[in-house]
Amino acid sequence: MRRPIIGTNHNVQVDFQINRSTKTTVELQPLMVEKLLRQKRSTSYVDTVTRLDATGVHCRKEDVEKMIEELQNEFPELLEHQLPIGIVSKCYLGEPYEVHSLDTQLQIVEHYKRGSVLPNGMEKARILAMNPNYEFVEVFTSCICAVARNGQISMIRE
Amino acid sequence: MSRIRPIIGTVSSEQIAQRESELDQKIEQIQQQSIDESFAQNFPAWDLNPPAILVRRKGKKLI
Amino acid sequence: MSNRAISTANLSRIENSLSEINKKIDASLSSTQAINTTNLSNIENSISHINHNIGVMYNEVAQANIRLDATQSSIQQLTKEFKEYVRHDQLQKNIQLAETRLVKVRQEIEKNYGHYDDVRRRALGILQAVDISLVRKETIESASEEQLIAAPSYWLAPCLIALSAWINNNKELAEKSVLEALRRDDEKTSLFFTLVARRGGRYLSSKLWLERYLSQQDPNELKKEIVVLIDAFSNGVFGVDARTKCVTIIQKWIDELSQKTGFVEEQRDQWKIALHAKQQGLNSNDYLHLAEYSPTWMKLKNSMEGAQLHLIIFDYFNSILSKEVIPSATLVIAVDELLEGLVSEYDEEEQPLKKEERMFELIIKQDGDKDKAQQLFGQEKLFNECVNFTQLLTNFAMYPEKSNASIATQKLAIALSKEWINHAHQDLTAENRSQVPLDVDIQIDKWTGTTRDGSNEEELVQQLKDYLDSERDHALSNNKIGFGSWFSLIAGIGLTYFAISMPFLFIFVAAFILAFFIKKSKVMKSKAVIDELYSNTFDNHKTILLAVLSDVVDYRREYSNEDAKSEYVEQLLENVSPVHYIYSTYDINRKVL
């Protein structure tokens, strides 16, 4: 059995400078944010995120970078702290791994076994992420958005 | 446990068109039937239509 | 000697004085007695006299009390009657005042708006096709000048002229009058001609007028006529084209309302509540084993009920959307009544006076009781009721039973709300899915185990066996020949040695050894019992376990099936469009499996 390269103690180093400048400086009201998050996700966004899954164990810096950039492009009106804190999806590494997450704050990808709890409030997205009807789940501070193949959103508020 | 499974099939576009025209016909029928003949017969052939003035909302409420 | 003489003299003098004093005391005593007796009897008399007087007074007071009570109730009676009198007087005054004022108000109405009634009468006359011949005969021009001056701000006056001009084939006058009418009240004029044109079979014209009327409406404050109008055009009363056009306008209303922050979210939340309310309880015979032996059961039950909701929702919308719309003539009647109502109702200008008139009428009718009159006035239909469009939409789509709307209108409302319904449904679905327990706990007696999908039967059976085995072993370990019994055996054996020399000790030897063997046999029996007990328990628990696992398998399968039906709702709503809502675009084939 291969030893997981990306494991619980390994962090992908945050050396690369991600350009975190968002296109707006106006903070939207919570209701406006909700309205925005309701909108269908673009195909390119969905594709990029699902492709991340396919890279499996070897998750390269560039992929994570691209992923985060894609996130910013998908939500240009949102400020940094309004972006998803993480994205959770089903892990195809197989047993014992169930889900993996892209933690946007730490910019790392982690894989989680059955029984281990996701940090930062991302645990609540677990079951939905494992559900085959959704490609992945975006975790925000006040809600989670389950994204289907066609980009449609189902939202669960806190 | 429910044993009946509804299955949705779509109707073809010809059928749709047909149904639409059927319903339209019925509507037109009723229209003809509901004209007040004794009233209608008094008016000349030309219609009295609204002018092409822009319509404004009464009170012009701001949204 | 002289001392003695003095003293004797003194003494005798003193004696005399004393005896005099004594006499005097006696005398006074006797006189006191005499006084006492006299006075006492006097006093006695006085007292009894006083007593008598008190008695008399007491009676008088009692009498006075009775009279006082009587007086009081008389006073009360009097007060009551007085109040009644005052009230009656007041009521009478009210009536008189109302009557006087009524006359004044009516005079004022007549003076200012007398011609309005005239206009209304004439208009109704034309509409009822009664006076048309009269209209023809009349000299339109002079009559129209007159009317316009007499009712300078009443919108119906120029409409009447336009109508008359139209009948008389005077296009120029007709169009001029229409302009004037629009200037006075665009909304009412538009509605008027919508209805008139429809009644006369001019559907193209009525469509144009209807468009004009609707474009002026504020979706936050729609007139109550809108309900009939929506019902009418959605059923095609104004024609096929009008329906399409009106739907477009209504969609604009929704777009406008959607701009308001929170509007869409509110709709969606309302739909979530309405949809969720349709959830039904699980059949109590399903999954009996899971219900009894799983601590996770409540969560499982909730999840299943949530999944079964999809079909329920589907059926609900389907039942409305697949019904055929049958255009009928009854709606036309309602529309015609609108016209009569429009023509007969009082103009805004007249309303203050009309309201006063009505108020006085009511006061008189209620015999001067102002409060009652006020109450009745409030209950009577308000002059200008307004409805909110969102509320209308909600009622049509969510509570059609309550709102009395026709099928076509219900369909329209659903079609217009479909985005909100979809989102609400998707959210409910996601919530349901996120709460399905991944792991199902099983508890049989004290044994617990977990399964996800019932496929780890072997593992669980083994766990159960191991558990029961260890329990059995524990029980067996307590079922031992104790220290005491071993001691008695050893003692017996030891005693044998001594018993050789003292034969009577053999009894004790026998007793000890017997005790040991009795205990041993007991232990053996208990062991057998324990073995059997645990063996039976294992069999029994295993049966239960297998039943529970079978339930789990069934559960997962059923859940998956029901969950998949969430797509049906999406598909259903996808096929509905506000423009084509009136047509059913799909079929339902029910196959019995």
Image (tube, coloured by chain):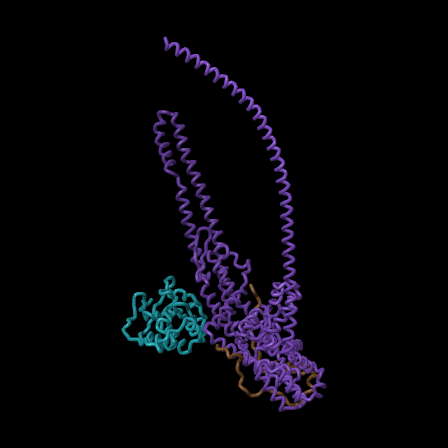
Q: Which color is chain C depicted in? A: purple
Q: Hey, which quadrant is residue C236 in on the image? A: bottom right
Res C490 visible: yes
Picture residue at 55% right of the left edge, 87% below the top: B53
Picture residue at 62% right of the left edge, 45% below the top: C68
Q: Using residue C109 as the reference point, say whether residue C424 is left or right of it.
A: left
Nearest the viewer among C261 and C191 is C191
C571 versus C158 height, above or below: above
Tag count: 0
Res C194 visible: no
Q: Using residue A148 as the reference point, say whether residue C591 is left or right of it.
A: right
Give percent across and percent down for residue C72. Answer: 62, 48
- Chain corresponding to brown in the figure: B
Q: Quadrant of the C terminus of chain A?
A: bottom left
A21 versus B50 height, above or below: above
Give percent across and percent down for residue A75. Answer: 39, 76
- Name, please, the residue furthest toward the top: C1
Nearest the viewer among C126 and C585 is C126
- Name, please, the residue furthest toward the front: C2
Q: Quadrant of the N terminus of chain A?
A: bottom left
- Chain corresponding to cyan in the figure: A
Nearest the viewer among C314 and A97 is C314
Q: Using residue C538 as the reference point, say whether residue C354 is left or right of it.
A: right
Q: Using residue C118 as the reference point, say whether residue A103 is left or right of it.
A: left
Give percent across and percent down for residue B55. Answer: 54, 84
Q: Hey, which quadrant is residue C516 in on the image? A: top left
Nearest the viewer among C220 and A119 is C220
Q: Hey, which quadrant is residue C354 in on the image? A: bottom right
